[in-house]
């Protein structure tokens, strides 16, 4: 393993866990160990009560070119070992309940788009190039693109880019709803951090409950989302943060939430 380059590192900045893909020499391509490290970082975010939001970003000029294919499919390759119960990078087995903002730039191909769509909000540098090109290589997307493109962009826009396997711009990604903001190159991570920090000024339990309820609608439809409202309401009305929110409104001051 001594020849393995690249890693996924993380650092705590206030209430935000900043997760950085760090393999710029290979355009931030992922090897199996990096996938394990990303899963561990997302699981830390999920499990730590002191962390209320996450930001995923990258070193160098590119977000990621995708998988380092020989390390996943070569004769001496070994698959990533993701512990049971961990949050996975694509949110297919277990998704993080806390908000995740992703900052993309340069090349954002294949799994880069799928990791971005597994989060909640995406900020793209204006030089970002997107491509879901698996079907040019005789395979298909395995990380959630086949349904998350549809939920974000609608059937026609999803099929257009998934079937053409074309390269498209940040402007196009913004037009169809895959990303929420486009900023000048070099400002994407700072803007993602700013968004995450703004989210963290709101009541974290309320934010997490909204995400869970939203996922309920995506996965099971409107009636399931309606059915979860009574339990959601009872849980939120019993929190210290609800009482603080009302008190701050009455006293005309900023609320100080504690996540309880």
Image (tube, rainbow, N blue to C red):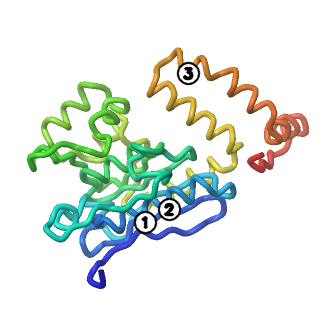
Asked whether residue 121 is in view, the answer is: no
Q: Which mark is residue 41?
A: 2
* Separation (CA) of disc 1 from disc 3: 33 Å
SS at badge 2: helix
Residue at the spot 29% in from the left edge and 54% down from the top edge: 128
Q: Decide which of tag 2 and tag 3 comes sooner along the chain.
A: 2
* Separation (CA) of disc 2 from disc 3: 29 Å
Q: Are marks 2 and 1 in contact (CB under 8 Å)?
A: yes
Q: Which mark is residue 225?
A: 3
* Separation (CA) of disc 2 from disc 1: 6 Å
Q: Position of residue 88 (x, y in %)?
A: 42, 52
Residue at the spot 54% in from the left edge and 55% down from the top edge: 54
Task: Report the label total.
Answer: 3
- Picture quadrant where residue 208 is located: top right
Quarter of the image where the N terminus is located = bottom left
Q: Is 80 displayed left or right of 259 in the figure?
A: left
Front-most of residues 152 and 221: 221
- Classify mark 3: residues with Cα within 10 Å, few (<14), some (14-19) or many (20+): some
Q: Position of residue 106 (x, y in %)?
A: 28, 60
Q: Position of residue 150 (x, y in %)?
A: 31, 30
SS at badge 3: helix
Q: Which mark is residue 37?
A: 1
Residue at the spot 55% in from the left edge and 69% down from the top edge: 11
- Specify the farthest residue to the front: 84
- Picture quadrant where residue 171 is located: top left
- Classify mark 2: residues with Cα within 10 Å, few (<14), some (14-19) or many (20+): many
Residue at the spot 56% in from the left edge and 60% down from the top edge: 44
């Amino acid at each position: 393993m001594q020849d393995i380059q690249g890693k996924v590192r993380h650092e705590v900045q206030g209430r935000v866990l900043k997760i950085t893909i760090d393999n710029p020499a290979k355009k931030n391509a992922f090897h199996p160990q990096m996938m394990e490290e990303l899963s561990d970082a997302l699981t830390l975010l999920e499990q730590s009560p002191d962390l209320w939001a996450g930001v995923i970003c990258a070193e160098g000029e590119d977000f990621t070119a995708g998988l380092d294919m020989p390390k996943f499919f070569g004769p001496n390759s070994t698959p990533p070992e993701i512990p049971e119960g961990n949050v996975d990078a694509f949110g297919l087995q277990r998704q993080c309940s806390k908000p995740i903002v992703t900052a993309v730039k340069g090349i954002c191909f294949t799994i880069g788009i799928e990791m971005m769509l597994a989060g909640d909000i995406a900020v793209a540098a204006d030089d970002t190039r997107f491509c879901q090109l698996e079907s040019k290589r005789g395979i298909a997307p395995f990380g959630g693109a086949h349904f998350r493109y549809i939920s974000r962009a609608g059937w026609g826009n999803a099929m257009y880019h998934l079937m053409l396997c074309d390269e498209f711009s940040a402007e196009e990604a913004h037009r169809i709803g895959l990303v929420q903001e486009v900023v000048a190159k070099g400002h994407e991570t700072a803007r993602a951090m700013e968004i995450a920090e703004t989210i963290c000024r709101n009541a974290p339990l309320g934010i997490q409950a909204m995400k869970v309820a939203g996922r309920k609608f995506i996965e099971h439809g409107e009636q399931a989302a309606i059915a979860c409202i009574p339990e959601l309401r009872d849980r939120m009305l019993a929190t210290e943060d609800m009482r603080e929110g009302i008190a701050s409104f009455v006293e005309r001051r900023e609320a100080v939430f504690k996540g309880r």
